[in-house]
Amino acid sequence: MNEQSRREFLKKLGSLGALAPVISVLNGCGGTGGLSKSKQNRPNIILCMADDHGWGDTGYNGHSFIHTPNLDRMAKEGIVFNRFYSGAPVCSPTRGSCITGRHPYRYGVFSANVGHMPKEEITLAETLKTSGYTTGHFGKWHLGILTKSEIESNRGGREKQAEHYSPPWDNGFDVCFSTEAKVPTYDPMVTPQGRKGNNPNAGKPYGTYYWVGPGNKETENLQGDDSRIIMDRVIPFIENAVKEKKPFFAVVWFHAPHLPVVAGAEHRAIYKDLTEYDQHYFGCITAMDEQVGRLRNELSKLGIEKNTMLWYCSDNGPERGTPGSTGPFRERKRSLYEGGVRVPGLLVWPQKIKTSRSVDIPCSTSDYFPTILDVLGFQMKGQPEPIDGTSLMPLIEGKMKQRVKPIGFESQEWRIGKKFSLVDDRYKLITNDDGQTYELYDLINDMSETKNIASQKPAIVKVMKQTLERWRASCKRSLAGVDYK
């Protein structure tokens, strides 16, 4: 990055408190800036995420019949995060946490189809571009509308939603193949028959599209399994990056197994002894797993697998009314109990992770941002409060014994009301909006959250309550815009 480009980027950043570490590093780079100490050591980075994939819906987590051989292989070769948390119990907020390191309530993404990624937030894609990375987003975006000119998806083209125009190409992504929100997991542009097989709109356009740029929709290769359709765009992006000898950052956000779940005949046949709906549900997960394997094979073929960080997680727990499994955990999507926010978490990075292992330290999607910046050669400095995540490099290197910074959650889901929670290495505090009723669970001895021990541990409740209140106050200050001044 030349001096003029560096100055333009710094001008955009302004004096954002949340990105003080980025500013300090850029300022220290002189005219040859970038974020890494050595360009030769810049890893490729891939963030894969499923949609509503339950913790229990993987072979490596003990599911009795599901076929996820490629996720299981990742578990055998990399790090399994036994306590990996989505940033929220629903999709849009979690997605925001993945690319900012900040809780989405700091910038108004309270739930699905609410708010957007503000231009003042600096995403991982924007940050990595300053270090020479090429960036791509593939799959579900759900952090703003992608068009203001035509009606599509949940909010696109609607006059009252125009302020929420914030597509991935305006947030640092060079290459996009993105939908605003959900699509069917097979033939994604076509309305399916539905669970009961009597949808009157079956066969008609679904109303959500894949966008590749401003006013530009993809029209080719949109039939069949949606995860395969997405990967058909990811692989050429990676091949081109390798050809141009550039490190890449790819965000691959699958739609599976979010409703409406549909699987092709090949993957349904694997589950032929189940009900038709369950065949579709588990079939689309296996189809997605197949594409994870395809991705890994491509990395190996190109000779870049060793220096590629490949992450996998889900955006929240499984949807209610589906056969999705939370394993031993309580509740599901939209809940702040473990089943709503504890999700599959995996990392393979052969250059750094030589042997597989499982870790019980709580980790979060908010940790991606500080971890990746740390990987590129520096540690977070200054006041960390606007950054909710923490670098996991010490954990990757086997040096982290416990999490220093607890994980805060806030939920305003209309089905369950306003709730807040805080998770540390052992305990979870959870409360309703009235601020009077607190529950405390020992997640080490009671992972299923069956016994509220708040009355037995008043001192722990008091300390965690104070921490939670400070964190909530910090989020409110951020929402008021003080981070951008």
Image (tube, grey):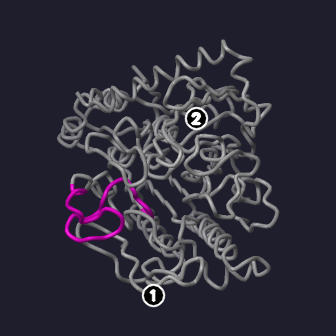
Left or right of 262 in this view: 283: right
Specify whether residue 307 is in view: no
Mark 2 vs mark 1, CA separation in Å: 48 Å
Instruction: State yes or no: residue 127 in magenta.
Output: no
Q: 198 or 346, which lies in front? A: 198
Q: Quadrant of the N terminus?
A: top left
Disc 1 secondary structure class: loop
Specify whether residue 79 is in view: yes
Q: 244 or 83, which lies in front? A: 83
Residue 203 marker: 1
* Percent coordinates x, y for residue 446 in the rendering: 78, 34
* Percent coordinates x, y for residue 421 in the rendering: 56, 32
* Percent coordinates x, y for residue 329 in the rendering: 72, 45
Query: What main secondary structure does the magenta stretch of the protein show?
Result: loop
Disc 2 secondary structure class: helix
Name which quarter of the figure residue 170 lies in.
Answer: bottom left
Q: Which residues are magenta?
A: 138-162
* Percent coordinates x, y for residue 129 in the rendering: 34, 48
Look at the picture and state if 485 lies above or below 295.
above
Instruction: State yes or no: residue 159 in magenta.
Output: yes
Look at the picture and state if 485 lies above or below 226.
above
Query: Viewer-nearest of labels 2 and 1?
Result: 1
Name which quarter of the figure residue 304 lies in.
Answer: bottom right
- List the residue tagged with mark 2: 393
Left or right of 451 in this view: 407: left
How many numbered discs sit on the rendered protein? 2
The disc labelled 2 sits on which kind of residue? Answer: Met
How dense is the environment of label 2, judged by Cα within 10 Å: few (below 14), some, or many (20 and up)?
some
Disc 2 or 1, which lies upstream in sequence? 1
